Image (spheres, rainbow, N blue to C red):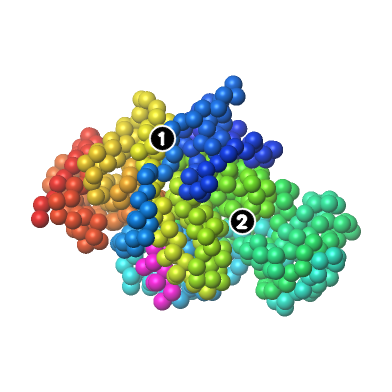
């Protein structure tokens, strides 16, 4: 777990806990809003009351509504002519990172290489489908692509967890008509048909009651009514559940996920099958991130961390809690304290929450993650690109709003897993993120974050905020930070500088009394999910803490890397953050020709 970050979460919990709880209650009073969606953004001003998102006011306990000018998280004004200017290509497509799910349409060396060049920095392997051998083949292709493109890529293992699935062994298409009845049965020996669907859960009849709603959709929920069905529980017959089909649809393929709105499923978050995959595939491939599906309590994260600690090679693996239902939302604060990052899984949340509440959770969760200095990842943004070359207008705006909300990364699921245009999807999402970052009001965000952290700051927090302040004041082109653990670099990135943060990770020599090894690769790859952070591995002979000229040679390598990538040019100013002896130093360098 990232050390030294829980201090900020306690304050978030004390002051903003009502915001999450209100998502499960009645809708707040709607206020008049400005017509442009660009201005319907989250206000980051802090108050002892609740946020009124629709009119950028703060609702105080006394009920008084106050306007706070200059608090909008949008840099104004925007020149209309600039909108028609073409986007400029960059070595770093966007500060916001992109997590791509590798699958049938994106597992070849050629496609993975193109995805890396387009901007994918984390490869996600979802074990809801496919066996270990299948995913290992994809992993070997990823290694080849990384080597050929010279692009660093982190690996995320996504667990299955307590996911309910329809078992369709024949993979034949199943036509369901609205008004008909269908039986859900735990007997998986039966063939799936329009009258009966086998499922992988024997306790369904004990978990639901007549009148409950059940959703069945293709993997990762398209939400398309022609491929997904809504069922209403009509009758319970032993272990079987008889349901009324609410809409006509065709189920095609082997894997369909079943979701029961706001019903607890009595299954472990980390199943035996998940543990087996982690012990075998995860250890073999030194996974950087574990995406813990259906995280419902902080204990789920603690249990997963305890399990990883027993696997020597995975003790450094970061755990990202995937919030997918109302139960996880209710316990969000304690989950955030335990987890290393949060995945806001809007697919399932969109079914568990009323549509008008989903954006509230996204904004509240991203805000809490930002203040805690932990990465926030948003899912389900460009679903239509699974089959289309361009996103809808609403989807494009949704990606931009995720960036303006403070998200560190965008996670693409079906779009790259089985989508027809995985490379184009990554490229377009990256371009949208890049444009949104240009209008992100960093000045407001920075002041608010400094105020939120309060005084006295910790030593590292003070150095990080000072480095960002200095970089903005002198209009530096990049911030270079020397680090061994990655913590200093993450703290700098927490303040959302407008320029890239080049994290120079210095490997350290360690021993377990049996063999010597270098650390650093984990720390470098784990930076690839943090917004604005771009890692590079330095020569292990040059320590991060030194009084010799060694640091100058490492700095030269970092500057040469920046020049080669095009982010540093002649006469640019660069802010450098490093340790010299026991002191932390922030210095400004002006480059010559």
Q: Residue at x 77, y 68 (%)?
A: 248
The foreground one among 248 and 513 is 248
The foreground one among 496 and 487 is 496
Q: Is residue 234 among the parts visible in the rendering?
A: yes
Q: Report x, y in % for residue 441.
A: 38, 42
Horizontal arrangement in the rendering, residue 196 relative to residue 377 (left or right): right
Q: Which residues are magenta?
A: 110-122
Mark 2 lies on a secondary structure that is helix
Mark 1 lies on a secondary structure that is loop
**Picture layout, residue 554 above or below residue 488:** below
Q: Report x, y in % for residue 23.
A: 64, 40
Residue annotated with mark 2: 347
Q: Is residue 512 among the parts visible in the rendering?
A: no
**Res 131 → quadrant:** bottom right
Distance between the Cα atoms at labels 1 and 2? 34 Å
Taking the magenta stretch, the answer to whether it contains residue 117 is: yes
What secondary structure predominates along the stretch shown in magenta?
A: helix
Residue annotated with mark 1: 70
Q: Residue at x 44, y 39 (%)?
A: 72
Q: Residue at x 18, y 56 (%)?
A: 569
Q: Residue at x 68, y 48 (%)?
A: 354
Residue 383: mark in rendering: none
Disc 2 residue crowd, few under 14, some 14–19, many 20+, Cα 10 Å: some
Q: Report x, y in % for residue 70.
A: 41, 35
């Amino acid at each position: 777990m990232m050390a030294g970050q829980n201090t900020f979460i306690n304050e978030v919990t004390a002051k903003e806990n009502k915001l999450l709880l209100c998502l499960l209650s009645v809708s707040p009073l709607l206020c008049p809003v400005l017509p442009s969606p660009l201005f319907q953004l989250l206000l980051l001003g802090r108050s002892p009351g609740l946020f009124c998102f629709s009119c950028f006011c703060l609702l105080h306990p006394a009920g008084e509504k106050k306007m706070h000018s200059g608090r909008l998280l949008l840099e104004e004004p925007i020149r209309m002519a600039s909108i028609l200017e073409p986007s400029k290509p960059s070595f770093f497509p966007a500060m916001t990172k992109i997590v791509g799910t590798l699958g049938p349409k994106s597992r070849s060396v050629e496609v993975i290489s193109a995805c890396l060049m387009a901007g994918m920095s984390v490869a996600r392997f979802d074990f809801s489908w496919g066996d270990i051998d299948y995913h290992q083949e994809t992993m070997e292709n990823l290694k080849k692509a990384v080597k050929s493109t010279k692009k660093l890529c982190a690996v995320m293992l996504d667990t299955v967890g307590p996911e309910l699935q329809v078992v369709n062994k024949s993979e034949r298409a199943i036509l369901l008509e609205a008004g008909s009845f269908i039986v859900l049965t735990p007997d998986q020996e039966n063939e799936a048909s329009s009258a009966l669907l086998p499922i992988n859960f024997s306790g369904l009849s004990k978990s639901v009651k007549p009148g409950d709603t059940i959703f069945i959709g293709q993997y990762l929920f398209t939400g398309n009514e022609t491929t997904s069905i809504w069922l209403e529980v009509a009758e319970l017959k032993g272990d079987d559940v008889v349901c009324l089909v609410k809409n006509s649809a065709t189920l095609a393929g082997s894997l369909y996920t079943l979701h029961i709105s706001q019903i607890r499923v009595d299954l472990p978050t980390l199943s035996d099958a998940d543990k087996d995959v982690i012990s075998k595939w995860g250890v073999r491939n030194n996974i950087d991130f574990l995406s813990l599906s259906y995280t419902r309590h902080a204990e789920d994260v603690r249990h997963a961390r305890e399990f990883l600690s027993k696997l020597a090679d995975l003790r450094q693996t970061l755990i990202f809690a995937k919030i997918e239902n109302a139960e996880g939302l209710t316990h969000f604060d304690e989950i955030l304290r335990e987890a290393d990052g949060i995945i806001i899984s809007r697919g399932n949340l969109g079914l568990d929450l009323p549509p008008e509440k989903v954006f509230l959770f996204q904004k509240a969760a991203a805000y809490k993650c930002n203040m805690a200095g932990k990465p926030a990842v948003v899912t389900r943004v460009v679903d239509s690109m699974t089959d289309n070359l361009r996103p809808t207008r609403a989807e494009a705006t949704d990606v931009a709003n995720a960036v303006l909300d403070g998200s560190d990364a965008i996670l693409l699921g079906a779009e790259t897993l089985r989508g027809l245009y995985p490379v184009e999807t990554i490229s377009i999402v990256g371009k949208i993120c890049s444009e949104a970052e240009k209008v992100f009001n960093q000045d407001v965000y920075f002041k608010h974050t400094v105020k939120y952290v309060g005084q006295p700051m910790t030593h590292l927090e003070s150095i990080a905020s000072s480095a960002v302040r200095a970089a903005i004041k002198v209009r530096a082109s990049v911030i270079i930070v020397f680090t061994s653990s990655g913590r200093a670099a993450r703290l700098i990135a927490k303040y959302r500088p407008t320029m890239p943060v080049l994290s120079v990770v210095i490997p350290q020599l360690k021993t377990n009394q049996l063999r010597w090894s270098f650390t650093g690769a984990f720390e470098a790859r784990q930076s690839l999910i943090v917004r604005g952070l771009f890692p590079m591995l330095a020569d292990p002979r040059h320590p991060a803490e030194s009084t010799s000229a060694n640091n100058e040679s490492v700095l030269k390598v970092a500057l040469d890397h920046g020049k080669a990538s095009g982010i540093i040019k002649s006469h640019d100013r660069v802010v450098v953050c490093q340790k010299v002896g026991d002191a932390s130093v922030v210095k400004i360098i002006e480059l010559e020709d």
